[in-house]
Image (cartoon, rainbow, N blue to C red):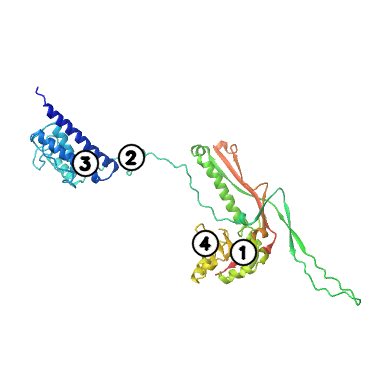
């Protein structure tokens, strides 16, 4: 059996190595889903020229000249070049790598109609397969097979804006506590001089006092969790602790600030305990009048309390009047000052709405001087896990609670403006 010449073997080995390098370039670009870089195109073309030189040495019967990548751009030339080169190494041939597939030719492995349709699809790149498995098809087509995972992070809904515990005087109580306060002032009067003609006594006037009782009212909630969910979702336990803090704090704001705090069986709120100053449209004038309704001795610790949307309504009116630079400062963190006084926000205060008519509320004063908030035992929110109560149902019950109260001790320290426009 004849053997190949040593030089021919070496040429074919070199040609195979160059083709491997071209495949590596193509595979790298395909894996990264990108076009070939300029440097890769130059390298590919240089390899093609080297292959041309090898083909010349192999002789015309062994190989046909190869075109460069640049010359064939836009027609998937690289795949043609490499495929043709591989075929020339394996089996030298004198017919083209892609034969004549025109209509009328006889095929051994398929009908002429199938061959024509196949090569038309290859030429126009109109491939289709209606029976393909895919993630986006029906469940039976493959979506059931796609692995899924739930993140261990559970994003929580945002807290309502709360401010009562920042503003009130907060203390810890062990039992009901009497809070004394001055209910009326003493009054000094003029005194006439005492002479031989008669004695003139000082006028009698004493201050008056009252007390209010700071008690403790229970509030909280319970959540039942199945043992299966508790075991499969470790993050749920820490989420529930944070959720208890959010829910208890939100409820407390409603009775410490809003209209729900009637003082009967629940704490007394700012809205129901402060001095009702006036009802007027929200304006620079009504804000100045509100400030003037509070005695100056309280100014050192005074602040405003708004619903944020009500504050924005005032801010917009000041911008329209070109007064915002002297009236309001407002930073990117949502902190604000109004006429130099700090502004706090509570979602429990009302904001004015024209229809259906809803009055707004603005508070100003020294809340710490006016209101005392007491927590029984400690300031913490208590959480208890009950693993026996619902054990027959395969559940664990979580309880949370706090006992608190709030009372007004100096009503004149805080004034309420009700806005009706």
Spot occupied by residue 43 in the image (x, y as percentages of width and height): 21, 41
Distance from Cα at disc 2 to Cα at disc 4 = 54 Å
The disc label shown at residue 128, or none:
none
Residue that label 4 marks: 330
Q: Are marks 2 and 3 in contact (CB under 8 Å)?
A: no
The disc label shown at residue 142, or none:
2
Tell me if residue 85 comes above or below residue 334 in the rendering. above
Distance from Cα at disc 2 to Cα at disc 3 = 42 Å
Spot occupied by residue 20 in the image (x, y as percentages of width and height): 21, 35
**Mark nearer the N terminus (3 vs 1):** 3
Spot occupied by residue 100 in the image (x, y as percentages of width and height): 10, 40
Spot occupied by residue 65 in the image (x, y as percentages of width and height): 11, 39
Distance from Cα at disc 4 to Cα at disc 3 = 61 Å
Is residue 25 in view from this perspective? yes
> Could you say which is closer to the camera, residue 420 or residue 238?
238
**Mark nearer the N terminus (2 vs 4):** 2
Give residue 297's quadrant in the image: bottom right
Mark nearer the viewer, 3 or 1: 3
- Where disc 4 sits, the SS reads strand
Which quarter shows the C terminus? bottom right
């Amino acid at each position: 059996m004849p053997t190949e010449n040593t030089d021919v073997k070496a040429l074919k080995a070199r040609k195979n190595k160059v083709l491997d390098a071209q495949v590596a370039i193509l595979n790298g670009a395909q894996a990264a889903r990108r076009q070939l870089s300029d440097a890769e195109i130059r390298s590919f073309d240089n390899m093609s020229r080297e292959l041309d030189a090898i083909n010349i040495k192999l002789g015309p019967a062994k190989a046909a000249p190869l075109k460069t990548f640049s010359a064939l751009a836009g027609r998937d030339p690289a795949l043609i070049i490499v495929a043709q080169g591989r075929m020339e190494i394996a089996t030298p041939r004198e017919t083209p790598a892609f034969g004549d597939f025109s209509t009328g030719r006889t095929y051994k492995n398929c009908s002429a109609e199938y061959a024509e349709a196949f090569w038309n699809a290859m030429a126009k790149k109109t491939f289709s397969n209606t029976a393909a498995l895919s993630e986006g098809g029906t469940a039976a087509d493959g979506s059931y097979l796609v692995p899924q995972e739930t993140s261990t992070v559970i994003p929580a809904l945002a807290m309502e804006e709360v401010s009562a515990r920042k503003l009130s005087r907060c203390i810890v109580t062990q039992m009901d506590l009497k809070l004394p306060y001055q209910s009326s002032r003493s009054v000094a009067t003029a005194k006439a001089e005492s002479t031989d003609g008669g004695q003139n006594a000082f006028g009698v006037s004493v201050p008056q006092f009252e007390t209010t009782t700071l008690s403790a009212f229970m509030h909280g909630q319970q959540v039942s969790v199945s043992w299966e969910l508790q075991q499969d979702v470790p993050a749920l336990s820490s989420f529930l602790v944070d959720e208890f803090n959010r829910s208890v704090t939100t409820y407390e704001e409603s009775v410490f600030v809003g209209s729900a705090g009637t003082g009967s069986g629940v704490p007394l709120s700012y809205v129901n305990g402060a001095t009702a100053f006036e009802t007027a449209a929200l304006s620079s004038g009504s804000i100045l009048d509100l400030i003037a309704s509070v005695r100056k001795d309280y100014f050192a610790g005074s602040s405003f309390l708004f619903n944020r949307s009500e504050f924005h309504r005032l801010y917009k009116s000041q911008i329209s009047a070109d007064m915002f630079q002297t009236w309001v400062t407002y930073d990117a963190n949502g902190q604000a000052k109004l006429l130099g006084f700090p502004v706090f926000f509570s979602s429990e205060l009302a904001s004015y709405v024209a229809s259906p008519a809803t009055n707004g509320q603005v508070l100003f004063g020294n809340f710490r001087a006016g209101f005392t908030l007491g927590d029984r035992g400690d300031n913490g929110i208590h959480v208890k896990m009950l693993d026996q109560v619902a054990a027959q149902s395969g559940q664990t019950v979580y309880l949370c609670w706090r006992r608190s109260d709030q009372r007004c001790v100096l009503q004149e320290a805080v004034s309420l403006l009700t806005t009706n426009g």
